[in-house]
Image (cartoon, helix red, strand yellow):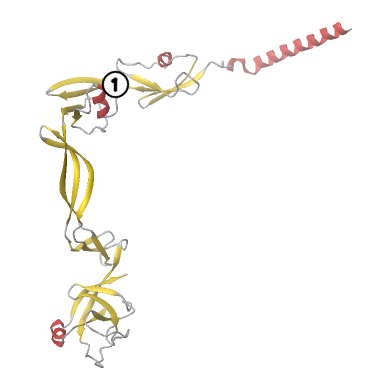
Amino acid sequence: MIDEYKQKIHFLIFLTMLFMLAAYSVLGFAAYVPETVKNVTVMDGNGRKVIQTEAFTFDSILKEARVQMGQHDTYWTSTPKVEDGTMIYVERAVPINIVYQGKTTTLYTTQQTVQGVVGQAGYDLRKVMPLEDGMSKVHQGMTIHINPYTVKRVTVSESVSPAMTLWYDETLSPGQQVIVEPGKKGVKSVTEDQYMVDGKIVHRDVISSEVSDPGTPGTARSGSEDGTVGRILRMKATAYHPSDGGGSGITATGTQAGYGTVAVDPSVIPLGSHVYIPSYGNAVAADTGGSIVGNRIDLCMETLQECYNFGQQYVDVYVSR
């Protein structure tokens, strides 16, 4: 009985396997892809091709992809061996002309930069250099000039543009600047390596730089408020003497009036503000006056004669923040 039972079990297993095989065939045996098939992408210039392959070498895959390799062409891969998802990048060699000591030779290269081509050609970059930018991109038919060079370390003096103090002027357009006082240029000492070819400097490498004289800052009007130290107002100016009015010479802020004291409308220039008037100098807004309203300013002078001489005139008033 036991043997008969085992035979029935084996027979049922056999039938089950036959059923599974039949179902697998019906559901798509034709779509079965062996595990050895890999998807490989070939990049050739701007072209891109994806192929399914069972090949195990990159050269075989390139043949399957119908990629014709020139004598000097090369390729590189994203993986050390062929795997599913591997990418193959084909690099096409281009002819480059190299001129050295009056002799021109042609080299086929896949290098991307001038410096790379010079190194591939066997030149020692410690002894020769390309006149073209070493990092510039190589293109077909390009000519690279190589020359022996010498290096000399020197210290030279260079001028330094003066710093500019910016004042906001709402009459200017945004971004516009107008120089009021140019300032004085400074001086810096620069130590550099000068690369010489045939007695001419073709390249400089700065080793150090030190400012020995910062110069004198200049002044400029700016149409943008960013970076400004204050604003410029166009105002009608008059002059007064400390003895005017009550004669005490005491200002609205309780200080003694004198040269460098100006009367303002506090709604325009707050009391205590530091101002600068080109024809007058630095001053403090410390006083007020009955007729000093709006864009008006009254400048304290040392003598009555100075007041008469000044009279009335329009001035630019630089108001610090």
> Along the horizontal axis of the image, is 60 left or right of 175?
right
Q: Quadrant of the N terminus?
A: top right
Identify which residue, 3 or 212, lies in the foreground.
Answer: 212
Label 1 Cα neighbours within 10 Å, binned few <14 / some 14-19 / many ≥20: some
Residue 98 can be seen in this image: yes
Instruction: Please say if 57 is above or below 186.
Output: above
Identify which residue, 233 or 46, lies in the foreground.
Answer: 233
Where residue 28 sits in the image (x, y, percent)?
62, 17
Secondary structure of residue under mark 1: loop
Residue at x-position 22% and y-position 47%: 209
Residue at x-position 15% and y-position 49%: 157
Q: Amino acid at mark 1?
A: Ala
Q: How many marks?
A: 1
> Along the horizontal axis of the image, is 23 left or right of 255?
right
Instruction: Please say if 258 is above or below 20.
Output: below
Where residue 255 sits in the image (x, y, percent)?
29, 84
Where residue 203 sits in the image (x, y, percent)?
18, 37
> Along the horizontal axis of the image, is 187 left or right of 85?
left
Residue 264 can be seen in this image: no
Task: Tell me the residue that label 1 is attached to.
Answer: 93
